[in-house]
Amino acid sequence: LNPVFAERPVTIFAVMSALANEHGAINLGQGFPDEDGPRALLDAAARFVVEGPNQYAPVTGIPELRQAVARANGRFYGLDVDWERETLVVSGATEGLAASFLAFLQPGDEAIVLAPFYDSYAPMIEAAGARARPINLEPPDWRLAEEALAAAITPKTKLIAVNSPHNPTGKVLADDELALIADVCRAHDLIAVCDEVYEHLIFDGRPHRPLMTLPGMRERTVRIGSAGKTFSLTGWRIGYATGPEHLIAGLVKAHQFVAYTTPAHLQRAVALGLDFGDDYYERFVAEMQQKRDRMRAGLEAAGFDVLPCEGTYFMTVDIRSVGYDGDDMAFCREITQKAKVAAVPVSSFYHPAAPGPRRYARFCFCKKDDVLEEAARRLKSYF
Ligand code: GLN
């Protein structure tokens, strides 16, 4: 077995979901909504399954979806995107990220990741033969310091992976942090792989600002979005990448050997979703913001110190605040088994060679209101 995979455990999301099922716990661990996305998309997909196409889609994705991706880039961010040369449909953001690392990295290269990070980044960077160089951000504000970024750069640095809004912390990169990353990318001729799957989940009226929109970044950035997150359809496995022609052409070559194609009927339905009016996007973020506030109130009532959550559908707590002195993995197991509420340990989002703090747990709040209330009640009576 390739040591990159042999030496890593089964993904924490699968582990905690299995434990939650085994113990009949409310699953606030793995990030997925407990209500499916818009009925119009479900109906459209059902119709398109019958109508087809049901054979291989084009490798790059169907034109309707790629055109819709290009339009969305213009509508939301003012980006002028050529759908034929600058977009690619991928089988979920996870595949888009993997294909990006395989396409852009070679043995000897280094890629910077900001830790904590989504668990697929480091293994897929390493599967490409490159070295992942984590920068561990410091809670509670997880700010990216100029010195830390400068210290991580070497002559071998090829790429930086940037995730904002950020899983698991709920942080949204500030303008000065984006500017700093852009400066470094330009100065060292780096590619930025931007994981923007939560682009439509930023709270308190704040807009999303893609790194790609900063000066000099358009030609060196690949921006990845996900219909799973934007339309609450995580099982459909539809994502989309936008970038300059030279990077997308390379990405297509990796994608053709990883996923080859993505189901065409689901692509057709997602294309309709991207063209939804502003009311859809406004309602989506407003509903999730209410859930955030409900979750925060519930966790605080149970005695937790809750860290800031500016975006995504995740919220982290300091487990010391309820007097727990074990590590976050033991904490998550204990509350799943005994309080019957599952969460995931933030320490699973670090590189094995640069472990992070073991005192934070992440709760996912894209759940029905009564489920969030019941979870809060259980935690309150347990602690
Ligand atoms: N992105 C989701 C999370 O962070 C689920 C990911 C997964 O199951 N691989 O929980």
Image (cartoon, helix red, strand yellow):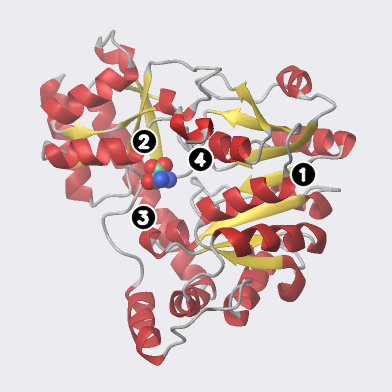
The residue positioned 73% from the left and 61% from the top of the image is: 248
Q: For residue 254, what is the image quadrant? A: bottom right
Name, please, the residue furthest toward the front: 1
- What x and y, as percent, mark residue 7? 46, 27
Amino acid type, callout 3: Glu
Answer with mark 3 or mark 1, whichever residue precedes in sequence: 1
Q: Which mark is residue 10?
A: 2
For marks 4 and 1, give the CA distance. 18 Å
- What x and y, as percent, mark residue 237? 44, 62
Amino acid type, callout 4: Ser
Answer with mark 2 or mark 1, whichever residue precedes in sequence: 2
What residue is pinned by disc 1? 191
Q: Nearer the viewer, mark 4 or mark 3?
A: 4
For marks 4 and 3, give the CA distance. 28 Å
Q: 277 or 38, which lies in front?
A: 38
Q: 368 or 218, which lies in front?
A: 218
What residue is pinned by disc 3? 287
- What x and y, as percent, mark residue 201? 48, 51
Q: For residue 64, what is the image quadrant? A: bottom right
- What x and y, as percent, mark residue 310? 49, 39
Observer able to see residue 145: yes
Whether the residue carrying mark 4 lies under 8 Å from ligand 1 is answered with yes
For marks 2 and 1, give the CA distance. 29 Å
